[in-house]
Structures are given as C-alpha cells and as structure tokens.
Amino acid sequence: MSHFQITGGVPLRGEVRCSGSKNAALPIMAASILASEPVRLEGTPRLADVRTQTRLLKHLGVNVSQVEEGMIFETVDPAPIRAPQRLVRRMRAGFCVLGPLLARRGKAVVPLPGGCNIGHRPVDLHLKGLAALGADLRLQHGYVVATARRLTGTTIDLSGPNGPTVTGTANVLSAAVLARGVTIIRNAAVEPEIVDLERFLAALGARIEGVGTSTLRIEGVEQLGGATHRLIPDRIEAATLLIAAAVTGGSATVAGVVPAHLDAVLEKLRQAGAAIEVGVECISISAGRRLRAVDVAARPYPGFPTDLQAQWTALAAVADGASRVEDRVFPGRFMHVAELNRLGAKITCGNGAAMVGGVRRLSGARVAAHDLRAGAALLLAGLAAEGRTTVDRIHHIDRGYQRLDDKLQQLGARIERVENQPWNSTIPKPVAASFSEASRLASGHASRMASSR
C-alpha cells in the first residue's frame, strides 16, 4: 500500500502531455478478440486497469506483447470462453469481453462486473441487446452464460433511464459486427471513446454506418482482419490537470489533446472566470484569481462528464459563492463529499446533487479515496489546501491515471508518493456492535489470558 503526501498552496505552472484514453483502451482491447489477424494498439496508457485487462485477455487466449508506443494482440484458436471472476470483478470494463467472445466463439461465460462503487449500474441493456441478436442468456452462480451458433441482425434500442449505456453500446456493437445481416442500434452512446471503438472496428473491416452518431447501421461480416490503431487522448485526464491548475490559481498547458472533446468542461471553466486558450492539440488555462461558483449537471456526452463531477466539486469547494453540482448519470456518485468535508469544505448532499458553499481555503488532513475519480478530487483539494494532506487508498487513482503524481510534479506540485503499511493499520478497529458482543469478546480475551498463565 502507498499514499500521497501533498503540501498545498502552490499555483501550478508549466506544460504537461496527456496520455492515451483509459476509457477507450479497455473496450478496444476487449474487441481485439474479434480480430483474426494481429492488432497493434498505439498510445496505450500504463495503468492498473490496462494491466488487469491484459491479464484477462491472456486468460482468454489472446497473446499480448508490449512494444514501443503500445501493445500487440493476437487471438489464438481454440481458446477459453470463461472469464475469471477475480479479474472481471476488479473493473466494469472487464464485462466488455462478453460481446466479442460470444460473436467470435459462439459462447461466453462472464461474471457480473465490478469496478468503482459509484451507484447502481445494471447490465440489463447489455443483455437485452445481445438477446435481441439471438443469444441464449442464463445467469448461473454470478456468471452470465451466453450461447449462439451465430448472431442475427436486428433493431436494438439502448436508451436507459439515465441516458445511453456506454459499455452496453461497446458490447452490443462488438457482437453485431459478426452477426448475420444488418443490425440497427438506436440511442447508441456517442462518447468519444465509443466513437474510437467504432473507428477501430472499421479499421478491422467492420461495416459500420453512422460513426459518431446515436444511430448505427452495422452490416455483419464473416470475419475481421488486423489493423494498427492509435487511441484518442484521455479527455478526463486532460480536464483533471486543467482543473488542478485552476483550483490552485495557476496557469498551465495540457498538450496532446482533442479540444473538441472538452467543450462542455471548457465552457464551465470560462463561466467560473478562468482564461482558456485552445490550440490545435493543446489547451491552456490561467486562473490568477479566485474562481466564481458555477452550477454543473453531469450528463451523457456531449454534456459535462460524470467522470469529472468529483473534480469539479473540489473546485467548487474553494470557489467564491454557492453552487449546485448534480449528477444525472450516476446520482449516487458522491463518495468524495465526506472526505472533502474533512478538509474543511462545506458540502451537503441529497437527491443526486451536492450543495457546495465555497470557502476561501481548505485545511490539510488525512483522507482516503473510495473510487477512482473521488481520489482525483482529493488530490486537487489537497493541492489547494493549507498545510499537508495525506491521501490514502491511492490504488484507486492508479487504476485510471498514468502516474498522475509525476504529471502534477511537472507543473510544480509538491506531491510525494510514499510506500507504507496498509493505510488503516494504525486505526483502531470499530467497537463491538452490542453490549453482549463486547462481553463475549472480553470473556474470550480473559480466558486466553488465564490459560496463558
């Protein structure tokens, strides 16, 4: 286990380069199962989730080799069709192997997914779409067992109560490219990461019309070939770095980005008073004075991303005025609020939103990340706080950011990664739940002491 130690109050300045997109890499890696020839994926970020997905693919018969600037994937037939629970339960994107396995091998046994605890995230739309393609689906002992001699094209609607499903679109699309006939997917997700998956599949030989839109027409083919594909930049990492500069009152440039992917975020930063300059592949921000409070509602793309809701809440915590931060994608995604309040923030939650009263300065304290983006929010808050902040459970952060501490150091942040004992090793265990339970424990302890004498 390790933690971050942050000495706050230093305005960030300089230039840093963005890594390849985690949220694009994971479903594309899963879709490499479909290829009958080697696939080269360039710009692959070096993350814990990518390592987990690599282990999962190797278990499923995909040879994976690391090369300069990326990875090479080559499927070996015949190969296993059962995904191990210990890997899929670590991250939600592991479930994205279901569609490719079913389409390529006719059967898939995949456990229900895990990942960050950010609220209810059902997979019913994944299963509904695959069933519409002709798959026989059963749930056995926590595993989805899917079989189909060959999938058949149909019309599928992927709209959900909180918007289109992103990983569901990846699963159904990846299955449809090898289905017999034509498949129409309505209300498909249009996030840049899904568009990148569509481009990748097209490079393999898939016939997809409507790339980048919410209606996709897929004409199934017998098999797919190989290709070389470069991932899009990670828009969430880029925005996290921009918000880090803003929350510290600094100025920075993030290079290697697609600015159009961040339109909604940049608009909110401008409304808050930050100066933004956009280049061809870079974004610069300057926030020399305290930012204004701005209301934000996270929505599906092209709206403000749910993956930046926590980071924006950290910015709002030190903005001038009161604001409302709402999440219409995952209304329960506010695990970071209690930890931000430990740092002196004034935030209350209810009905899928946080009411934030900005304070002039946070105060360093020991906090713990409960999920990936919550961890990033705590880093940003620590950068803005007086004194020292310690962030524990940083394995969550490492799942989705490629050495975020190194990139922040490039901008002048005083942040150190410290290897240590488990973060809670010095924290007393919770008291017994009842008097009778406490008596039983005390009695057992007394008996052991007597016998030892």
Image: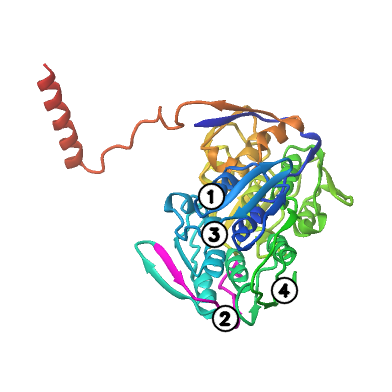
Secondary structure beneath dot 3 equals loop
Q: Which residue in the structure is indicated by mark 1?
A: 58
Task: Check whether the beta carbons of the residues at disc 2 and disc 4 lie within 8 A of each other.
Answer: no
What stretch of residues is rendered in magenta? 143-165
Q: Amino acid at mark 3?
A: Asp
Q: Which residue in the structure is indicated by mark 3?
A: 77
Mark 3 or mark 1, which is nearer the start of the sequence? 1
Mark 4 or mark 2, which is nearer the start of the sequence? 2
Q: Amino acid at mark 2?
A: Thr
Secondary structure beneath dot 4 equals strand
Mark 2 vs mark 3: in front: 3
Examine the rendered structure and indicate whether residue 27 appears above or below residue 256: below
Task: Check whether the beta carbons of the residues at disc 2 and disc 3 lie within 8 A of each other.
Answer: no
Residue 207: mark: 4
Q: Residues within 10 Å of mark 2 (few under 14, many from 20)?
A: many
State yes or no: residue 120 in magenta.
Answer: no
Secondary structure beneath dot 2 equals loop
Seen in the image, is 202 located left or right of residue 153? right
